[in-house]
Amino acid sequence: MLYLKNKNEVSLDKFQRFNTNSWDELKKRISYKLVNKKVFYAQEDANDIVHEDCMDLSKVYIVTELSQDRKNIISYVLKNQDLERFGKNREELYMQVHSNYLNDKHKRIHTLKEDALAHEILYPLMKDLSKVSLSGINMLIEDSNEQRDNVLFVTNKYNVFGTSYMLDKATLKEVHDRMQDDFYIVPTSVHQFLCVSCKYVTKQRDTYEVEDDLLDMLYTMNTENKNTEDILSYRIYRYIADDGEVLFPIKQQI
């Protein structure tokens, strides 16, 4: 089961660090989170929420802020009535968010070891092959200096809604430049995603077999995820730079 709402979602009047009645202050804090499109449209208030659809996902625009105890990020889902209140249209919003992402200093692109040190959540699951008994998955935990950029995690400083970078062209290009290769994307949660070099993961192996392994790995991680609201998708994606920088879904488990 996939969920839209996050446990730290609040109303706009709960924000304390800036004036929510000022567009100039609010606009700098707008980003978006990715949610499953089918689940999103199952919400009763879907048509009231500012969003865009992309592939099988929906971009839901949000306002975020560090909580008072500095332990969590609280968020507010932007509504159409909010744009009306500030006299802004969608195009102005999209341009502002694009600018926010260009100036974003919280993005993190980590190797497996760096991610393990930062979060210590996903790596133990992948390392425990009794839980992930799949041929070829063991290659993902190899992380020598020569191959350290073949498997990368993408998120942000707070590891909150970091999967939004999946639709950020500059981020995908940065990953491609580091890998010097096209890559698969495995959305491990709504907060981060895994990038795997196509050449690295398919060496001497059938492409379809590799894709099935990655898909099974994603299914296992989703099954093991105790925070069901953090699950984004049961589908994997592929980024192809030579085809006009295309990102597209290729498989789905259920």
Image (spheres, rainbow, N blue to C red):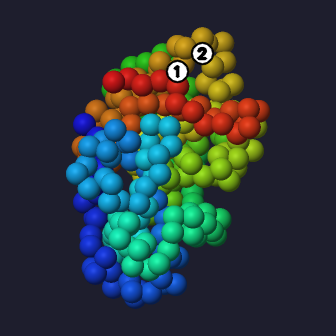
Q: Quadrant of the N terminus?
A: top left
Pick the residue in front: 152 or 1: 1
> With 99 as the anchor, is 26 left or right in this view?
left
**Residue 240 coordinates in the image, percent (x, y):** 68, 33
Tell me whether circle 1 and circle 2 mark residues in contact (CB < 8 Å).
yes
Is residue 181 visible in this depiction of the protein? no
Q: Amino acid at mark 1?
A: Glu
Q: Report the number of numbered marks.
A: 2
**Residue 25 coordinates in the image, percent (x, y):** 49, 84
Can you identify the residue that label 1 sits on?
A: 211
What residue is drawn where x is 57% and y is 57%? 108
- Local crowd at mark 2 within 10 Å, few (<14), some, or many (≥20)? some
What residue is drawn where x is 50% and y is 37%? 55
Can you identify the residue that label 2 sits on?
A: 207
Q: Amino acid at mark 2?
A: Thr
**Residue 111 coordinates in the image, percent (x, y):** 59, 46
Pick the residue in front: 200 or 82: 82
Is residue 214 visible in this depiction of the protein? yes
> With 94 as the anchor, is 69 left or right in this view?
left
